[in-house]
Amino acid sequence: MARRLTVTVERFPIAGAFTIARGSRTEAVVVVATIEDGGIRGRGECVPYARYGETVESVGALIEEQASAVAEGLSPHDLLERMKPGAARNALDCALWDLEAKRTGTPVWQSLGLSAPSPVTTAYTLSLGEPASMEAAARKAAHRPLLKVKLGGEGDPARIAAVRRGAPESRLIVDANEAWRPETITENLAACAAAGVGLIEQPLPAGEDALLEAIDRTIPICADESLHDRAGLDALARRYDAINIKLDKAGGLTEAVLLAEEARTRGLTLMIGCMVGTSLAMAPAMLLAGQAAYVDLDGPLLLARDREPGLLYEGSLVHPPLPDLWG
């Protein structure tokens, strides 16, 4: 019997709200690709992202366009040639890997020649807000070793200082989500240095970040929105010190593995990140987490409920997926 592809849309409420410089939301809407073959089922989850022109409908349609190819034996490496990077390719790529692992009994990490995944410490994200509310949120999360702080542009030095007051011992990452401007970046960098921030994500808008080639800094700067797949790595390496690999941007685990390899040859530090999704979206990224200096796979921690079975989180320590979940 030929392999059969199905696409479903699922919604998971966020605990409270998730707010960044581009807006706020109260639920995670995910698209799941499922491939069935003789009673064996492989799954992959993606999160369509409007910042990259994606909608739930467009991503679902792109996945469904591959139904015939899937039935005929499409492989993850074939997929790199058939689809562009993005959420749709990610869901399908991860579903293909999961199906192969369940069919053969060989874990995905082994098939890809990676090291066996082990527990890692993930960042925990604090949403953008007024300094007082962010200080209160930081105080509640101060027991976590690594916090990721969402910033929004104007007023960010006060936010950074407030979070540091609330969590004096935690390591800090700040994520501006493209909200800083050339005229404010020096002040914001100084505020980060004063607070002992360890990493700054995407301070300037993608496409307007050439200024970073000339800026002296003591804190490494990480590309997020400026990075998708291996294309453009040479230019990024001149501007950034690190890259945030997200499977939804790279278009799947297959590309993410190749991207990580090429980034390391250019001396770039790795961060493994995520959109706000369930454990099914985090599980494939766990295979790369051991290579990363920073891990940000806290999506399920931000949800009011995760799918079952999910990843095991012990505080900020996240464990590799069990086969029932993925891989």
Image (cartoon, rainbow, N blue to C red):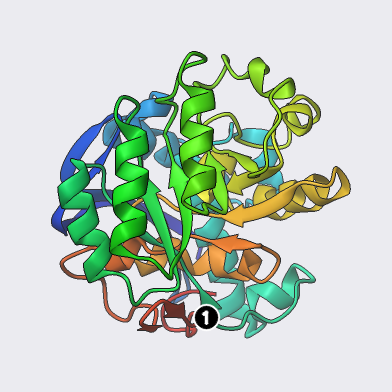
Q: Is residue 222 above or below residue 32?
A: above
Q: Is residue 166 left or right of residue 290?
A: left
Residue positioned 73% across, 20% down in the render: 214
Asked where in the image residue 200 lies, by quadrant, the reply is top right
Q: Residue furthest right?
A: 265
Residue positioned 26% across, 42% down in the render: 128
159 and 288: which one is in front? 159
Asked where in the image residue 4 lies, by quadrant, the reply is bottom left
What percent of the width, then of the height, locates residue 32?
A: 35, 55
152 and 271: which one is in front? 152
Q: In this view, does 152 lie above or below 266?
A: above
Density class for disc 1 (Cα within 10 Å; few <14, some 14-19, many ≥20) is many
Q: Is residue 299 left or right of residue 36?
A: left
Amino acid type, callout 1: Pro
Q: Is residue 67 above or below residue 147?
A: above
What percent of the width, then of the height, locates residue 252?
A: 57, 50
Residue 20 visible in the current orientation: yes
What percent of the width, then of the height, locates residue 205?
A: 49, 21
Quadrant showing the C terminus: bottom right
Asked where in the image residue 15 lies, by quadrant, the reply is bottom left
Q: Mark 1 points at which residue?
A: 320
Residue 35 visible in the current orientation: no
Under circle 1, the secondary element is loop
User: How many numbered circles does the render carry?
Assistant: 1
Residue positioned 68% across, 54% down in the render: 270
